[in-house]
Every structure is written in C-alpha cells, then in structure tokens.
Image (cartoon, helix red, strand yellow):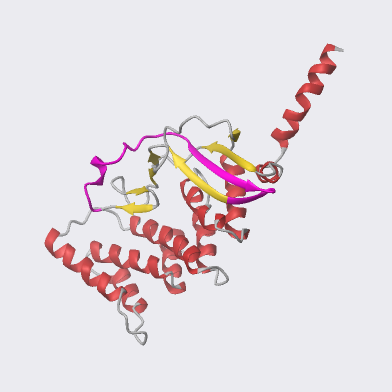
C-alpha cells in the first residue's frame, strides 16, 4: 500500500518530465516560466543585462539590447562570467508573448515565476527553433538570441531560413542576418594587423557606401566585392557587418557559404 501511494504521488512529476518543453509551456496557462540550459563555451554574461555571444570576440558585449564594441565599455558594466543560460518566457493562455535571455550568475527566481529547472540542449533547441520559425509575435525575433547561445545546436541553418523569410518583418530578417554576418566575419581570423588610422578610414568608407541615399544605387554588389576580395581584413569585416544590417538575400547567400560551405 505504501509503495502504491508513493507511486501515485510520483506519477504527475514523471508525466511532466516526459512531456516536451513546448507542451509544458502550452500547459502553463497565463504565467511567467523560466528554464536553464547549457550555453556555448565562448559565451558569458552578468546574469541580467549583458552577455557576450562569442561571435565578435571577447571584447564585444550586448548590453541592454545594444551591441557594444570598439570602446572601453568594460569598465562600466558588470564582469562577463561563465554560467548557465536562463530563458524567461511570459505565457498568455498557453502562447509565449515575450522572451528574455540571460547568461552567467543568474539570480534566484521570484515566487511569481514557475521554474522548469534545467532542460537538455536538444529539448531547448527544438522549442526555440519552433518558436523562432513559426511564432507570429515578437517572440520569434527574441528566440533567435538563445538559439545562437545554445550549446551544440545547428544554429546557422535556422538563422539562414529566418533571414530569407520574405513573409516576415524587416527587423526579424535583419536580426537573423546580423548574427550570420558577425559569425561570418569570425571566419576571417585575426592574424592580419592593420594600421589604426588607415583602418578607421577604410571602415568609414564602407559605412558611407552602405548608407548612400540614392535609391537608384544598389550598394550590395560593391559590399560583396569588398567582403570577399579586399586585401584588408578590417574592410572585409566592415562590409560583412553592413551586409548584415541590410539583410539582402545575396548577402545571406554569402554568409551561408562562409559558415556552412555551401
């Protein structure tokens, strides 16, 4: 009898453990949920506002939604520390309405948040991939970030699909393309050293080309030429970054070829 009672008590917990993460989220009703998962080794964060996704080197951080680089910002924000990735999701009648990502020494959850605990990377990846590619709300864009940070997940294929989806808003496509662009720039290596003054001039010239206002002029062919054939790494990186901001399908094809070899 005692064994039967124990088994009955454990059954709901066992059933929950067997459910997919997506099913558990849909069953949450209207509330805020959170789960933790292992991020990639190159990532770090302060557990709340800032993190490094590892795509642009260790001295680049995302702080409060903005990418910070080429500046001594690291003396003004909390250190970037290793730790789990926490994804917090606001669910309304079983449908995610917003999503927030943090990495590092994540704080203790409040009583109003339902803690799903630690989930596997494959489970989190499937949930986030589905959310990013099928959700019609802002969570589709927000889900791209944890997909990039998630350990051992084939992220570039998903981001390429997102960046090419002409049915989506420009902001969604550009977010995906920006991740791809910065990752593609990382494949160029860091061995080449450029003179600081000349480097700044080259970057400014690339930025000016990308921002030309004449509608009759298409900057993409010239940016692609710089990104693939220029002798200076800094100019190539600047061109890739600007192509990521434009989100043009021709640029996405270049990113994909650099990251996936096709």
Residue at the outermost top position: 2
Q: Quadrant of the N terminus?
A: top right
Q: Report whether 86 appears left or right of 214.
A: right
Could you tell me which residue is drawn at 58 percent across and 71 percent down? 167
Could you tell me which residue is drawn at 40 percent across and 70 percent down? 246
Could you tell me which residue is drawn at 24 percent across and 66 percent down? 235
Question: Is residue 170 placed above or below 128 in the rendered structure?
Answer: below
Question: Is residue 179 placed above or below 116 in the rendered structure?
Answer: below
Q: Quadrant of residue 58?
A: top left
Image x and y of residue 88, in percent: 54, 42
Image x and y of residue 113, in percent: 58, 36
- Report the span colored magenta: 70-97
Please give the count of numbered marks on the rendered protein: 0
Q: Nearer the viewer, residue 33 or 161?
A: 33
Image x and y of residue 40, in percent: 45, 42
- Magenta-span inclusion, residue 26: no
């Amino acid at each position: 009898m005692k064994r039967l009672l124990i088994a009955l008590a454990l059954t709901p917990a066992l059933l929950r453990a067997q459910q997919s993460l997506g099913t558990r989220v849909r069953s949450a009703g209207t509330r805020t949920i959170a789960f933790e998962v292992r991020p990639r080794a190159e990532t770090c964060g302060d557990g709340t506002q800032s993190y490094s996704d590892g795509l642009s080197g260790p001295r680049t951080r995302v702080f409060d939604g903005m990418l910070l680089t080429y500046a001594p910002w690291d003396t003004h924000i909390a250190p970037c520390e290793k730790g789990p990735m926490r994804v917090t999701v606001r669910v309304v009648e079983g449908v995610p309405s917003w999503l927030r990502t943090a990495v590092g020494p994540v704080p203790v959850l409040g009583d109003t948040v339902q803690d799903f605990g630690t989930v596997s990377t494959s489970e989190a990846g499937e949930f986030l991939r589905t959310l990013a590619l099928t959700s019609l709300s802002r969570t589709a864009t927000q889900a791209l970030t944890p997909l990039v940070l998630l350990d051992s997940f084939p992220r570039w294929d998903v981001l390429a699909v997102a960046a090419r989806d002409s049915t989506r808003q420009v902001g969604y496509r550009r977010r995906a393309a920006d991740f791809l662009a910065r990752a593609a720039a990382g494949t160029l290596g860091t061995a080449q050293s450029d003179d600081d003054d000349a480097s700044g001039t080259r970057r400014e010239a690339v930025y000016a080309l990308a921002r030309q206002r004449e509608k009759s002029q298409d900057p993409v062919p010239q940016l692609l030429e710089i990104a693939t054939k220029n002798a200076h790494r800094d100019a190539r990186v600047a061109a890739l970054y600007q192509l990521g901001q434009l989100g043009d399908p021709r640029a996405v094809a270049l990113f994909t070829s650099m990251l996936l070899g096709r």
